[in-house]
């Protein structure tokens, strides 16, 4: 039953994030971080509020979503289109760093996918960096 609650909460967060009914995500003093990894044939992404601490793969890849009133955001998504839609909710000029720390379960998609996400970020006016 707890798994169903997690899925239901994640669904509501994603619907709110992608529906356009929510105002832009809050500005983050340390920007946002984007992570990617592949499960089977699906690419997964997490957009999370930037911090000074390293995050574990388990923390980042957990199927939980949070957008709270204190500015903490963590949204896990599947696919380029949903990731681009969520990044379009970030404030213009916001810093986003896409990183995949080696040896922790993260991976980089193909170059054309990286280009699609980079183009979406740039068209939104984000300060977007890919750090390999």
Image: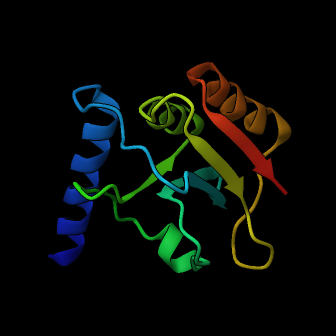
Q: Quadrant of the C terminus?
A: bottom right
Task: Give me the residue at 48% from left, 76% from top.
Answer: 59
What sort of colour scheme is used for the picture?
rainbow
Q: Position of residue 99 (x, y in %)?
A: 72, 59
Residue 52 percent across, percent down from the top left: 59, 73
Is 113 above or below relative to 69?
Answer: above
Q: Residue at x 44, y 37 (%)?
A: 86
In the displayed structure, 19 sits above or below 13; it is above
Q: Quadrant of residue 25?
A: top left
Measured from the top left, where is residue 36 in percent x and y? 65, 56
* Quadrant the N terminus occupies: bottom left
Left or right of residue 33: residue 99: right
For the point 67% across and 25% down, the residue is 122
Relative to residue 7, is residue 5 drawn left or right? left
Q: Looking at the image, is 89 positioned above or below residue 65?
A: above
In this view, 23 is above or below 100: above
Q: How many numbered discs?
A: 0
Image coords of residue 33 (percent x, y): 59, 56
Does residue 79 appear to the left or right of 25 in the view shown?
right
Q: Camera-side residue: 103 or 68?
A: 68
Q: Residue furthest front?
A: 29
In percent of the image, x 62 and y 26: which residue is there? 120
Residue 27 lies left or right of residue 31; in this view the side is left
């Amino acid at each position: 039953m707890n798994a169903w609650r997690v899925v239901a909460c994640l669904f509501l967060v994603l619907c709110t994030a992608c529906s356009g009914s929510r105002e832009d995500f809050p500005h983050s003093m340390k920007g946002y971080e984007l992570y990617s990894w592949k499960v089977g044939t699906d690419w997964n992404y997490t957009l999370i509020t930037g911090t000074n601490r390293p995050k574990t793969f388990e923390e980042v890849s957990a199927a939980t979503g949070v957008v709270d009133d204190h500015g903490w955001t963590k949204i896990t998504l599947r696919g380029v289109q949903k990731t681009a839609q969520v990044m379009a909710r970030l404030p213009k000029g916001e810093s986003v760093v896409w990183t995949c720390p080696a040896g922790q379960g993260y991976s980089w998609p193909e170059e054309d996918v990286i280009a699609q996400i980079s183009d979406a970020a740039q068209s939104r006016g984000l300060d977007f960096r890919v750090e390999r």
